Image: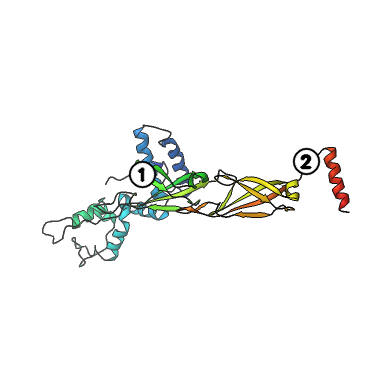
Amino acid sequence: MEYIDYYKTLGIPKTASDKEIKKAYRKLARKYHPDVNPNDKEAERKFKEINEANEVLSNPENRKKYDEYGKDWKHAEEFEKAKRSGAYRQGGGDPFGRGRTYTQTDFGGEDFSDFFSSMFGGASGGGFHSRQAQFRGQDYNAELKLNLTDVYTSQKQTLTINGKNIRLTIPAGVEDGQTIKISGYGGEGTNGGPKGDLYITFKILNNTAFKRDRANLYKDVDLDMITAVLGGEITVDTFNSKVKLKVKPETQSGTQVKLKGKGFPKYKQENNHGDLYITYKVKTPTNLSAQQKALFKQIADLNK
């Protein structure tokens, strides 16, 4: 496996802060994004490299492993286990008989993975059995932005992740900030190991007049003073239709009514909805004529 300098890929020093890594990644991602460079294979390749570098360096734990083990950072835990178990110690299976724990510098620049290959990969007469450890592939993370109207019903979408098209069904009722896992759509495993997983975090943008709280919806509706006083019938918008409501006489501003089952679908339950809560906001009339003002004066006199 060829060594890739992730710091060089992002154009940052090894001492870069998390903020500097994020800034460099965003700048390069915008420059080489497939939407900005359609049908540009070189830009697509660069975009993949930038994403790979960011996935490693933006994760403090992975960055630490990468800084110590280079291209073999994914196998850091295996190397650490081997060192702790004394795999390099005299009497513990050390083919060199040095009687001490080795570090990467003891191999004269040879990678850890190359050393393990020569140690366990079938050296003649050494008494070692050929074996190749299998390692699980890297997990991928992606963010998907959708409008609230997009997740009112289940829908199919095709996403492009690291150059691969992935067709998936997005269940109705997905929440803002919710993360779902798609097994087996991460990085390739090593030596026949299983693939990693893909984690998608949803960013739901509210493009409606409704407020959402899980499966319940909330909306303010203006109510004219005459209807509020005398009662009547009004038409209001639900999320996907219109309904007629009867307003009781002497309805006060702030009165809330519940429309059962007119809310948002519950997650993965497209036919099971929450409730819609309508709050009346009584509006004071403006630009009254002289006759209308006189009528209100009469009402005021009657209340004295």
Name the foreground residue: 210 vs 73.
210
Determine the residue positioned at 31% across, 49% down.
Answer: 71
* Percent x, y of residue 39: 36, 31
In this view, 190 is above or below 43: below
Determine the residue positioned at 10% across, 59% down.
Answer: 125
Mark 1 vs 2: CB contact within 8 A? no
Where is residue 116, by image quadrant? bottom left
Q: Which residue is mark 2?
A: 286
Name the foreground residue: 228 vs 214.
228
Viewed as shown, does residue 135 lie left or right of 231?
Answer: left
Q: Amino acid at mark 1?
A: Ile
Badge 1 element: strand
* Percent x, y of residue 58: 43, 50
* Disc 1 residue crowd, few under 14, some 14–19, many 20+, Cα 10 Å: few
Badge 2 element: loop
In this view, 241 is above or below 69: above
Residue 19 showing in the rendered view: no
* Percent x, y of residue 168: 38, 46
